[in-house]
Amino acid sequence: MTYFLKDCGREASSPAKDREDIARAVAETFATRPYIRYAVFIEPYADGSGDDSVELIAVPDGRFGVPLVPWAATGCEEFAYDLVAALGRDVDCCLDGCERARLAPIYRAIVPIYRRPDPAIEPANRYLASAKADATIASSALRCHRMNADHVARHAARTVGQSLLATTSAFGGKGDTMATLPDILDSAIECGALFRRGWMGTAAERLEAWMSAAEGGADISGGDALEAACLANRFADELLEKRRTAFRIETQRIP
């Protein structure tokens, strides 16, 4: 799909003419979007036919998918007009895996033009590692002969928070590990990780309350711990449905 400079609605850079200029503009655009792993440039037709748009294929990180944008048609809408402004030219872009991306190498040469720097994705990777560890701890605490309800409640809430922070970071949002779970949820929704649903706010508040109580030394009942695990798994299912990485808590008790 082509995104036109005339529709950009913002000041654009001087037109990028050569491949080096195009590569610089693409890197500038994706620098704050770690969910894009790399991008390739589709070379113009050898005979000079075709329009003058810059043609790109963007490859997102499969662990995070792409941000949810209302009325999006191609998945490129979140970054397309930033590319247009940075390049100063019309941009025809698509995501890896679509028919256009599969057919392009058959008829045209493609050239790697951007690769995500490793440090850009490190914060998201750390959050994912933490979420996996918290889910494992919560599962173990739940399966103990005498359930450790405090551990279940605390690490169930942390599993949700760390999973949301991972996707928020990958989508260029600023994760705050000191924020409350409802605030973390708001940031994740704002950056396009999830669509807001009516149950989410209440669930985040309940998980936050149980986590705070457990960290404060209060006793958590077994019923509350089980509910915390179920709410955490509901968030995990929502993230997994949107093609984000998430970790479920194993709720099967050992007889």
Image (cartoon, rainbow, N blue to C red):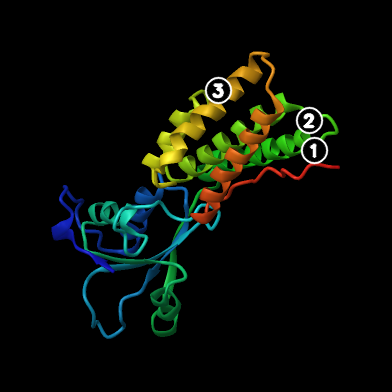
> Which SS class for mark 3?
helix
Residue 71 lies, with reference to residue 108, above or below; the image says: above
Q: Is residue 245 above or below residue 156?
A: below
Give the residue number, with chain letter if any, for mark 2.
147
Residue type at mark 3 is Ala
Q: Which mark is residue 143?
A: 1
* Residue 86 in the image, given as x and y percentages of width and height: 26, 52
As measured in the structure, the alpha-carbon distance from the residue carrying label 1 to the one carrying label 2 is 6 Å
The answer to whether the residues at label 1 and label 2 have Cβ atoms under 8 Å apart is yes
Instruction: List x then y, in percent, for residue 153.
Output: 65, 29
In this view of the protein, can residue 175 be seen by the observer? Answer: no
Tag 1 or tag 3, which sits nearer the N-term?
A: 1
Q: Amino acid at mark 1?
A: Arg
Residue 173: give x, y in percent of width and height.
42, 38
Q: Disc 2 vs disc 3: Cβ atoms closer than 8 Å?
A: no
Q: Identify the image quadrant of residue 137.
A: top right
Q: Depth check: 123 or 87 in front?
A: 123
Residue beneath the point at 37% across and 40% down: 190
The dot on residue 209 is 3
Residue 104 in sight from this viewpoint: yes
State left or right for residue 14 relative to residue 113.
left
Q: Residue at x 45, y 67 (%)?
A: 96
Viewer-proximal residue among 84 and 146: 146
Quarter occupied by the C terminus? top right
